[in-house]
Image (cartoon, helix red, strand yellow):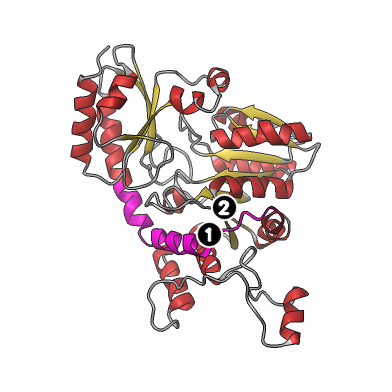
Amino acid sequence: MTEEHEIATLLAAAFGGTHGSVTPPIVQSSLFTFDSYQAFEDRMAGRSDTAIYTRVQNPTVAAFEALMATSERGEAAVGFASGMAAISSSVLAFVKPGDRIACVEHAYPDAYRLFERMLRPFGVDISYHSVAAFEDDPDLLKGVRLAYLESPNSVVFQPMNLPKVAEQARRHGTLTMIDNSWATPIFQNPLVLGIDIVVHSASKFISGHSDTVAGVVISSDRLIRQIRDLTLPLLGAKLAPFEAFLLTRGLRTLDARMQQHQRTANVFVDRLSNLPCVTRVHSPGGNSVPGLHGRSGLMSFELDDSIDIPRLSDALKLFRLGVSWGGFESLILPARVGLAQAGEENSMQRFGVSPSLVRISLGLENVEDLWADFEEALSKSAA
């Protein structure tokens, strides 16, 4: 059965009997009651999984979680109020003071801040390593509790040989966690490649409409149960029913949208690579590493000194200046602004991020309109 058929089957099973509705009903209730004392006792004793309180369980949220588990080839999933809630709740469910985290370089900036501003002061040791080190150093993960990965990583979009890293992690008993927001389940399934836990900022491609902030974690029943038992109820960063409804809507068009993002990205990679003022393009394509099947619309490139980046940004009409990505609209984010805004100038130097680097998120607008806009802005931005 194909992934699309699996999702369709789940949707029909979840919602087909609800007055013939083809979309999931929004169960906007904070609590759920029971018909008998025995049913209540069974739920409180963990002998049933009936919904009891929306902070920990809700039918609309559960339907979205089931779809995400299927799409990522996992056993179970749990939704959160944001991508950072998914990351922090997952990390805190498995890491304690004295443990070690090995994090890939160029990780999502707020994940980096979580590690440095919160976990390190609480006695967690964090080290940062290149993609090559994760792949080639057989002893890198010795004594490490958690390997925090991205493939590709943020900013410079370096892909990673996940099967190779997963095998080395298993040898050392290291838990592996990866942010798969860039590739989505359409272009990469890390659990199939041996990774233990997948997290998504569902605000991005999963939603696809720039109207939802959410996160989701997918893994085995055992590991998801640990998150549900500890950090989901106690930190309280639950996914709301309405956001789950919007995310289910986004999942229905995810494949079609990702294919369009890829077509546009392929055009931009080819044309950017032929511009004299572009010194480097960062955008891994399908099959560049095992298990990566496509290219999303998020990429970066570096410009030479002939281009004034602020002038380029201001001259664009279809590309808007802004953070986040994954929606219909195309965005531009100069790296020195995106990182300096949060006080991370030193991390740019530490990890070798060029101040001439520009990140773009290619949306769903007509590709020739986007390229014409970019070319015109480029002609107006010569320093």
Position of 143 compared to 356: left or right? right
Q: Cβ–Cβ below 8 Å for labels 1 and 2?
A: yes
Residues rendered magenta in the picture: 235-260
Pointer 2 local density, CA inside 10 Å: few below 14, some 14–19, many at least 20: many
Q: Give the mark, 1 or 2, whose residue is nearer the N terminus.
A: 1
**Going by the picture, which residue comes out furthest to the right?**
98
Specify the amino acid type for callout 2. Leu
Residue in the image at 61% along x and 67% along y:
54
Q: Nearer the viewer, residue 320 or 361?
A: 320
Residue 329's x, y, as percent? Answer: 31, 43
Q: Is 374 contained in the magenta span?
A: no
Residue in the image at 24% along x and 22% along y:
378
Residue 314, picture quadrant: top left
Residue in the image at 32% along x and 45% along y:
261
Q: CA distance from mark 1 to mark 2?
A: 7 Å
Pointer 1 local density, CA inside 10 Å: few below 14, some 14–19, many at least 20: some
Give me the disc on residue 191: 2
Position of 46 compared to 325: left or right? right
Position of 19 compared to 33: left or right? left
Specify the amino acid type for callout 1. Arg
The secondary element bearing badge 1 is classed as: loop
Residue 280's x, y, as percent? Answer: 37, 22
> Chief secondary structure of the magenta span?
helix
Quadrant (top left/top right/bottom left/bottom right) for the C terminus: top left
Q: Nearer the viewer, residue 363 or 291?
A: 363
Q: Nearer the viewer, residue 93 or 245?
A: 245
Q: Is residue 40 above or below residue 186?
A: below
Give me the disc on residue 73: 1
Q: Is residue 211 above or below residue 270?
A: below
Residue 379's x, y, as percent? Answer: 20, 20
